[in-house]
C-alpha cells in the first residue's frame, strides 16, 4: 500500500528534457529554425504596439498621399519611405502585418485553448464514466472526424452567425470564430485523454484513493494530465497551425474577423485585389508572414511528434 | 455483412437527421421567414394568414417532419438574395464543382500514390527527401494562399493561364454544362485543380508512404523476400496491394474534403460552383441556401463514407469471411 | 569427411546506433553437413535469428555483416550482388518464420502465393506450378489440398498455416531450410506435428535444416548437432546427445540443468543466476564471466576462442585451454 504515498517519479520531465528531447532538438536544424521563426513572429505580434512604426487603426496618422508606396522607395509626393511599402490607404504594410499577426495568433491560441479544455474535459468524462456517455461522445467524435476541420469551422461559423442578431454580428465575430474553430478541433484531445483515463482508471492507486476516501476523479486528473502532456502538446502545436490556417482561410473568404480588425487572412484578401494593378507588395508580405508562421509551427509540431514518439517515424 | 451495412446505414440516417435539425433550426429561427418573403406593405392579418398557410404555427415536430419531407423532394424554398428556387441554383452550379473536384481528385490520387510509393522505397535518397520537404510545405500552405500565389505566377507574371472563371462551356445533355470539351475551359481548370488537389495529394502521399513503410516491415513481406521473389513482385505485387487497402478508405474520404475545400478554391478563382454560392450565402445570411448546402454536403459525406466501406469489403478478403463461409 | 553444405566462418554482425556500434554476432563459426539438422539454441537476444537472417541475406538495416564469410556448397554467398542473392533465397535456402499468422499475405490465396514462388524459381507453366503446389500442400498434410488451395490464409488454423508456410519454403526444393522458431507461436498440441512434418519432408528431399529454437526438448528430439549461442558468441557446438548429456561449457551445463527430464530424479532444477548482458554492456573477456560458477582470472581478461574437443565438439571456454590445463594439473 506504500504505493499511495509514492510521488510520481521525481524529475521525470526534467530528465526527459535533459536527454532525448533536447538531444533531438540540438540535432535538428529544422526544429531550431522553426522554433526561432515562430518565437520571433509571436514576440513581434505581442509587442506590435511598441514595434510598429505606425498605428494602422488610427486614421489621424494616415496620409492618403502615402498610398501605394512601393517598399524601400520614397513616396513620390511625400518622400516618406516604408520598409514594406504601403497599401491603398497609405497604411504601412509592416505595421498592418504586425497587428494582423496579433489577431491571427490571438484567435489561434484562444481556439486551441478552447479545443483543449473542451477535449480534455470530454475525454476525461468519457474515459472515466464509460457506458453510454462514452459511446455517445466517441460516436460524435467519429462522425466529426469524417469532416475536414476547416469545413466544420466554416459551417459552425455560418450557422452561429445566422443565429446572432445582425446588430451584434461584427462585435462578436471574433469570439464566434474562436468557438467555431475550437469546436472543430476538440476530438484529438478527447481521444488521447480518454485512452489514458481508461488505462489509469483500473490501476491500484485509483482504487486505493477510493479506500482512503479521496475522490478518485480528482486523483485521476492529477495523474493523467502529466501522462498525456506529451501527446497533448503535439496535438496543440499542430492544432495551432491548423487554427491559424482556418482563421486565415475564413477571413480570406470574407466570413471571418470583421474588416475593422484585419488579420493576416484579411490582409491577403485585400492584397489580392491589387495583384493585377502591379502593387504586389500588399499581397506578398502578409502571405509570406502567414506562410512562415504556419510552416514553422507545423514543422515544430512534426518534430515534437517524432521526438516524443520515435516509433511513429 | 448485412448487419454491418445496416449499422452503417442507421448511423448515416442519424447523422443526416442531426444535420437536418440544424438546417431546420436555421430556417425556422433565423430572422422571420415571412418578413423575408413579403414586402413592407403586407398587413398583419395577411402575415398571420401566411404563417398558418406555411405551417409556421404547427407544433415543432410537425414542422420538422414537413421540412424533411420537402427536403427529400429537393424543395428548400427560395433564395432570399437571388430570388430563385434554391435547388435550381444548386443544380445549375453543381457541374462546375463536380468537374473541378473530379479532376483534382484524380490528380491527387495518381501523383499522391506515385510519390508515396517512390519515397517509401527510396527512403533516404535525395529526391525522396526533397519530395518530403516540399510536401511539408504543401501541408502547411493554406489552400487559398496556394491559389493566390499560382494566380500571381501563372496568370499575372507569366500570363500563361486564366486566373478566374470556367472559360467557354458547352452543354452536354439537358443541364450539364461542361468546360472539359473546350480549350479555354480546360486551361481555366488547370490552376484551380492544382490548388484544390495539392493538399490532398500531399496527404495521400504521406499516408501511402507511412502505410507502405509499415507494410514493408511485416512478416509476410520478409517471408516473400525470403522466398526469393523479385523486388518488383514484393514491392508492387505484395506491399503496394496491402498498402492500398487503408489508402482507399482515406482517399475516398478525401473526395468529400475536396468537395468541401472547393468552397475556398472557387472563391479564389471565382469559379461558378456550389462552394462560391455557399460562401455568399454565409456572407449575406441567405438561410435557404445555407440550409440546402449543409444538407447537401452532409449527404455527400455520408454517401462517400458508405461507398468507401463497401469498397473496403471488396478489396480485403478477410472482411468477406461471412460470404466465403456461406459459399462453402 | 565430405565438404559441408553450409560453412559460416567468423561471422560478425554489427548495428551502428546513435551511441556507438553494437556487435550482435561476434566471430560465429559453424558448419552444416548435407542432410544434417543443426539446432541453434540460446536465450532471446543471443543472436539466433540474426544468424539465420545473415545467412539468407535479409538483415534488417542498419544491421550489416561486418566481417567473416558464409559459404554455400563451396560458393561464397555473403557478398553476392543483390540480384544473385535473391536467386539463392527460396531456390537454395528456404526459410520458415515464427508466426504463421503473419507470414502469409492476407490478400492472396494460398494458391497464388505458392504458384508465384514456384514460377519465380522454376520454369513451369501456370498449370504445372499449380499441380506442384497441390502436391506440396498434400505432402505437408493439408486435407483436401486440391480444394483448399484456393482459400485465403485466414481460412486456415495456425497449425495449418504453418504447414502452408513450410510448403512455401520448400516450394523450389532448397538445399537448406532455416526454420526460425517454427513452433513457438503455435498451440502446444500441434507443435510436435509441425516439427515432424518439417523433419520428414526435409529428410525426404535431402535438405539440411538449421532449426532455431529456445526449446531444448525440440532440439533433443530433432537435431543431429546443436550450437549454443550466448550474447552473440558461440559457446559450444557438438552432437546433440553429447552436449545434452555432458555439456562442457558452464553456460550449456547451466542450461541443461534448468530442463526437467523424466528419467532424472534430481531433487531440484538448477538455475543460472543473473541474466544475459545487453549488447551494449558485454563484459571484457568471456561474456559469461559475471554468471559463471567456474570463473577464474583469465576469463576477465581474454575472450576465449572455439577450442576443438573430442568427437567433433567445440567449446569456447578457457577451462579447456591446453595451457590452462597444464597450470591446473601441474
Image (cartoon, coloured by chain):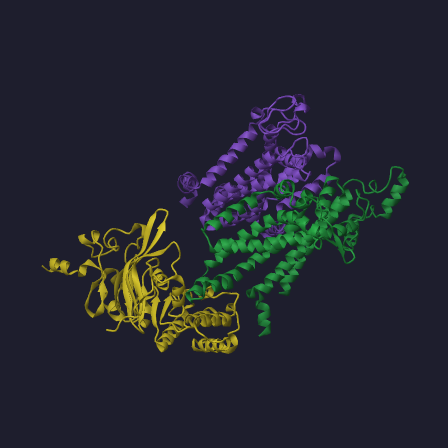
Chain colours: A purple, B green, C yellow
Q: Residue at x 23, y 53 (%)?
A: C285
Quarter of the image with the N terminus of chain C is bottom left
Residue C37: x percent and y percent? 32, 71
Quarter of the image with the C terminus of chain C is bottom left
Residue C186 in the figure: left or right of residue A159? left
Residue C93 figure quarter: bottom left
Q: Nearer the viewer, residue A293 or C190?
A: A293
Q: Nearer the viewer, residue A225 or B310?
A: B310
Residue B289 in the figure: left or right of residue B234? right
Residue B106: x percent and y percent? 62, 55
Q: Relative to A45, is B249 above or below?
A: below
User: Is residue B6 among the parts visible in the rendering?
Assistant: yes
Residue C103: x percent and y percent? 45, 65
Residue A266 in the figure: left or right of residue C207? right
Residue A9: x percent and y percent? 41, 42
Q: Relative to A166, is A65 above or below?
A: above
Q: Residue at x 50, y 68 (%)?
A: C153
Farthest left residue in view: C330
Q: Relative to A211, is C265 above or below?
A: below
User: Is residue B17 among the parts visible in the rendering?
Assistant: no
Q: How many marks?
A: 0
Q: Residue at x 69, y 56 (%)?
A: B13
Q: Relative to C150, is B282 above or below?
A: above
Residue C159 figure quarter: bottom left
Residue A147 in the figure: left or right of residue B78? left
Amino acid at each position: 500500500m506504500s504505493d499511495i504515498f509514492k510521488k510520481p517519479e521525481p524529475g521525470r520531465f526534467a530528465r526527459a528534457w535533459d536527454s532525448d528531447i533536447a538531444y533531438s532538438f540540438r540535432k535538428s536544424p529544422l526544429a531550431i529554425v522553426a522554433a526561432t521563426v515562430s518565437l520571433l513572429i509571436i514576440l513581434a505580434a505581442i509587442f506590435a504596439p511598441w514595434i510598429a512604426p505606425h498605428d494602422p487603426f488610427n486614421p489621424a496618422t494616415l496620409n492618403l498621399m502615402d498610398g501605394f508606396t512601393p517598399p524601400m522607395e520614397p513616396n513620390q509626393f511625400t518622400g516618406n519611405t516604408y520598409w514594406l511599402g504601403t497599401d491603398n490607404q497609405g497604411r504601412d504594410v509592416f505595421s498592418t502585418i504586425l497587428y494582423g499577426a496579433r489577431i491571427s495568433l490571438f484567435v489561434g491560441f484562444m481556439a486551441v485553448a478552447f479545443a483543449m479544455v473542451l477535449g480534455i474535459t470530454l475525454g476525461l468524462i468519457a474515459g472515466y464514466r464509460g457506458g453510454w456517455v462514452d459511446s455517445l461522445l466517441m460516436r460524435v467524435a467519429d462522425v466529426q472526424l469524417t469532416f475536414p476541420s476547416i469545413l466544420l469551422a466554416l459551417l459552425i461559423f455560418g450557422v452561429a452567425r445566422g443565429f446572432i442578431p445582425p446588430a451584434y454580428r461584427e462585435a462578436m465575430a471574433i469570439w464566434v470564430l474562436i468557438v467555431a474553430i475550437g469546436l472543430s478541433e476538440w476530438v484529438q484531445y478527447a481521444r488521447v485523454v480518454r485512452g489514458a483515463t481508461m488505462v489509469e482508471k483500473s490501476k491500484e492507486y485509483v482504487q486505493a484513493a477510493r479506500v482512503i476516501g479521496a475522490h478518485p476523479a480528482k486523483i485521476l486528473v492529477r495523474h493523467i494530465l502529466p501522462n498525456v502532456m506529451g501527446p497533448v502538446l503535439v496535438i496543440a502545436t499542430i492544432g495551432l497551425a491548423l487554427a491559424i490556417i482556418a482563421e486565415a482561410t475564413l477571413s480570406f473568404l470574407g466570413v471571418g474577423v470583421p474588416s475593422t480588425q484585419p488579420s493576416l487572412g484579411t490582409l491577403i484578401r485585400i492584397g489580392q485585389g491589387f495583384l493585377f494593378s502591379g502593387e504586389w507588395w500588399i499581397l506578398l508580405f502578409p502571405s509570406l508572414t502567414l506562410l512562415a508562421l504556419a510552416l514553422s509551427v507545423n514543422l515544430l509540431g512534426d518534430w515534437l511528434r517524432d521526438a516524443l514518439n520515435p516509433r511513429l517515424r | 455483412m448485412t448487419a454491418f451495412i445496416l449499422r452503417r446505414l442507421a448511423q448515416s440516417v442519424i447523422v443526416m437527421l442531426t444535420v437536418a435539425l440544424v438546417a431546420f433550426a436555421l430556417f425556422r429561427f433565423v430572422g422571420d421567414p415571412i418578413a423575408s418573403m413579403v414586402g413592407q406593405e403586407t398587413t398583419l392579418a395577411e402575415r398571420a394568414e401566411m404563417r398558418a398557410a406555411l405551417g409556421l404555427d404547427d407544433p415543432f415536430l410537425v414542422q420538422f417532419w414537413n421540412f424533411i419531407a420537402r427536403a427529400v423532394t429537393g424543395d428548400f424554398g427560395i433564395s432570399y438574395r437571388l430570388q430563385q428556387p434554391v435547388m435550381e441554383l444548386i443544380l445549375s452550379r453543381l457541374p462546375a464543382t463536380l468537374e473541378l473536384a473530379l479532376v483534382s481528385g484524380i490528380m491527387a490520387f495518381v501523383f499522391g500514390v506515385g510519390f508515396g510509393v517512390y519515397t517509401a522505397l527510396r527512403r533516404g535518397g535525395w529526391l525522396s527527401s526533397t519530395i518530403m520537404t516540399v510536401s511539408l510545405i504543401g501541408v502547411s500552405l493554406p489552400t487559398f494562399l496556394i491559389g493566390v500565389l499560382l494566380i500571381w505566377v501563372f496568370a499575372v507574371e507569366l500570363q500563361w493561364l486564366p486566373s478566374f472563371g470556367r472559360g467557354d462551356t458547352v452543354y452536354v445533355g439537358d443541364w450539364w454544362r461542361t468546360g472539359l470539351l473546350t480549350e479555354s475551359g480546360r486551361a481555366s481548370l488547370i490552376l484551380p485543380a492544382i490548388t484544390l488537389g495539392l493538399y490532398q495529394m500531399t496527404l495521400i502521399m504521406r499516408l501511402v508512404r507511412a502505410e507502405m513503410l509499415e507494410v514493408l516491415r511485416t512478416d509476410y513481406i520478409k517471408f516473400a523476400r525470403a522466398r526469393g521473389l523479385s523486388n518488383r513482385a514484393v514491392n508492387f505485387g505484395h506491399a503496394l496491394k496491402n498498402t492500398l487497402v487503408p489508402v482507399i478508405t482515406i482517399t475516398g474520404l478525401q473526395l468529400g474534403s475536396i468537395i468541401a475545400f472547393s468552397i475556398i478554391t472557387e472563391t479564389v478563382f471565382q469559379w461558378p460552383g456550389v462552394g462560391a454560392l455557399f460562401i455568399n450565402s454565409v456572407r449575406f445570411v441567405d438561410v435557404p441556401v445555407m440550409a440546402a448546402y449543409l444538407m447537401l454536403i452532409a449527404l455527400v459525406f455520408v454517401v462517400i463514407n458508405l461507398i468507401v466501406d463497401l469498397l473496403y469489403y471488396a478489396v480485403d478478403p478477410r472482411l468477406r469471411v461471412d460470404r466465403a463461409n456461406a459459399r462453402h | 569427411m565430405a565438404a559441408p553444405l553450409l560453412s559460416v566462418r567468423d561471422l560478425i554482425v554489427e548495428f551502428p546506433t546513435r551511441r556507438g556500434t553494437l556487435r550482435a554476432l561476434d566471430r560465429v563459426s559453424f558448419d552444416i553437413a548435407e542432410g544434417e539438422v543443426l539446432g541453434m539454441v540460446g536465450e532471446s537476444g543471443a543472436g539466433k535469428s540474426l544468424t539465420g537472417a545473415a545467412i539468407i541475406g535479409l538483415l534488417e538495416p542498419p544491421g550489416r555483416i561486418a566481417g567473416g564469410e558464409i559459404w554455400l556448397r563451396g560458393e561464397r554467398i555473403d557478398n553476392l550482388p543483390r540480384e544473385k542473392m535473391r536467386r539463392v533465397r527460396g531456390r537454395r535456402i528456404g526459410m520458415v518464420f515464427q508466426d504463421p499468422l503473419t507470414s502469409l499475405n492476407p490478400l492472396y490465396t494460398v494458391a497464388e502465393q505458392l504458384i508465384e514462388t514456384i514460377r519465380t524459381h522454376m520454369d513451369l507453366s501456370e498449370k504445372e506450378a499449380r499441380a506442384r503446389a497441390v502436391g506440396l500442400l498434400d505432402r505437408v498434410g493439408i486435407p483436401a489440398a486440391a480444394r483448399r488451395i484456393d482459400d485465403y490464409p485466414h481460412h486456415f488454423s495456425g497449425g495449418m498455416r504453418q504447414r502452408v508456410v513450410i510448403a512455401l519454403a520448400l516450394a523450389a526444393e532448397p538445399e537448406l531450410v532455416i526454420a526460425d522458431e517454427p513452433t513457438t507461436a503455435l498451440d502446444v498440441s500441434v507443435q510436435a506435428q509441425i516439427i515432424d512434418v518439417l523433419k520428414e519432408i526435409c529428410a525426404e528431399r535431402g535438405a539440411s535444416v538449421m532449426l532455431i529454437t529456445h526449446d531444448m526438448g525440440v532440439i533433443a528430439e530433432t537435431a543431429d548437432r546443436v550450437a549454443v549461442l550466448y550474447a552473440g558468441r558461440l559457446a559450444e557446438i557438438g552432437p546433440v546427445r553429447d552436449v545434452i548429456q555432458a555439456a562442457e561449457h558452464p553456460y550449456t551445463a547451466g542450461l541443461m540443468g534448468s530442463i526437467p527430464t523424466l528419467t532424472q530424479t534430481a531433487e531440484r532444477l538448477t538455475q543460472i543466476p543473473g541474466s544475459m548482458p545487453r549488447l551494449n554492456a558485454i563484459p571484457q573477456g568471456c561474456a559469461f564471466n559475471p554468471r559463471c560458477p567456474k570463473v577464474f582470472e583469465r576469463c576477465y581478461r581474454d575472450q576465449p576462442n572455439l577450442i576443438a574437443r573430442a568427437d567433433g565438439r567445440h567449446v569456447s571456454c578457457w577451462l579447456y585451454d591446453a595451457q590452462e590445463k597444464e597450470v591446473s594439473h601441474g
